[in-house]
Image (cartoon, rainbow, N blue to C red):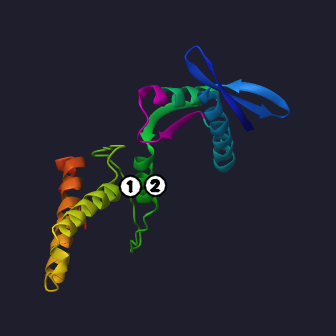
């Protein structure tokens, strides 16, 4: 499938693609369904059963219409989307599943339960980008004030900037993460 151009149909974009020598106009969910049908085939081959239900991941910044379009893409290929979750949440769950535990003894029975306590995001707040921008502004102001001209001020200034950077990082985390999530969260 090769992208050729984009056209509008009833206030919705359609992508014109070349597929097996023919041009086709497809909505976004139809293109997503091509990906989902391949994923469904791979899952069925691995599991050895017909897959009817699925948990489908979407980017964290997807709005409700985009989530619904993804759910519709699943329906096109015969998947019942029992849950839609954000990709970062799915990555965290996958990490938890792959986390190795060494349990010794004659008999061990284990069960894992993952509860997502909080999910938050802001597409305009990018952790290190925001931190670097703020840090750069602080450094720039210090240069304007000519603090760095004093030889004995270098160490004190660097220490001050380091402390400010850590305080900004703490502020960004506290501003974007719900308080109940911070109880057991360690950050550096």
Circle 2 packing at 10 Å, graded few (<14), some (14-19), many (20+), is few
Q: Is residue 50 visible?
A: no
x%, y% of residue 20?
84, 34
x%, y% of residue 173?
23, 55
Residue at image coords 55%, 16%: 11
- Which residue has dot 2 on it? 94
x%, y% of residue 87?
45, 46
- Which residue has dot 1 on it? 111
Q: Is residue 45 left or right of residue 144?
A: right
Looking at this view, is 63 or 140 the one in front? 140
Q: Is residue 167 left or right of residue 130?
A: left
Residue at image coords 69%, 31%: 5
Residue at image coords 17%, 63%: 167
Q: Vertically, is 65 above or below 104?
A: above
Q: Vertically, is 120 above or below 149?
A: above
Quadrant of the rendered structure where residue 76 is?
A: top right
Q: Is residue 107 left or right of residue 46?
A: left
Say which element carries label 1: loop
- For the view shown, which residue lies furthest in the top direction? 10
- CA gap between label 2 and label 1 equals 15 Å
Looking at this view, is 56 or 164 the one in front? 164
Q: Vertically, is 115 above or below 71?
A: below
Based on the picture, tell me whether residue 36 belongs to the magenta stretch: no
Say which element carries label 2: helix
Q: Vertically, is 153 above or below 128?
A: below
Badge nearest the viewer, 2 or 1 = 2
Quadrant of the rendered structure where residue 183 is?
A: bottom left
- For the view shown, which residue lies furthest in the right direction? 21
Image: magenta residue range? 52-67
């Amino acid at each position: 499938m090769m992208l050729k151009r984009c056209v509008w149909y009833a206030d919705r974009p359609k992508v014109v693609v070349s597929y097996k020598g023919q041009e086709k106009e497809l909505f976004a969910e139809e293109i997503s369904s091509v990906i989902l049908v391949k994923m469904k085939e791979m899952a069925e081959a691995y599991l050895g059963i017909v897959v009817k239900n699925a948990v489908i991941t979407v980017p964290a910044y997807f709005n409700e219409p985009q989530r619904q379009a993804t759910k519709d893409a699943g329906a096109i290929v015969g998947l019942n989307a029992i849950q839609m979750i954000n990709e970062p949440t799915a990555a965290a769950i996958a990490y938890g599943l792959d986390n190795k535990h060494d349990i010794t003894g004659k008999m061990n029975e284990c069960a894992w339960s993952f509860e997502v306590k909080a999910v938050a995001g802001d597409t305009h707040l990018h952790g290190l980008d925001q931190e670097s921008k703020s840090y750069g502004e602080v450094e720039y102001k210090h240069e304007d004030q000519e603090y760095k001209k004093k030889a004995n001020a270098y160490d004190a200034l660097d220490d001050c900037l380091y402390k400010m950077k850590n305080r900004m990082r703490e502020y960004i985390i506290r501003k974007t993460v719900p308080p109940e999530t911070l109880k057991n969260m360690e950050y550096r």
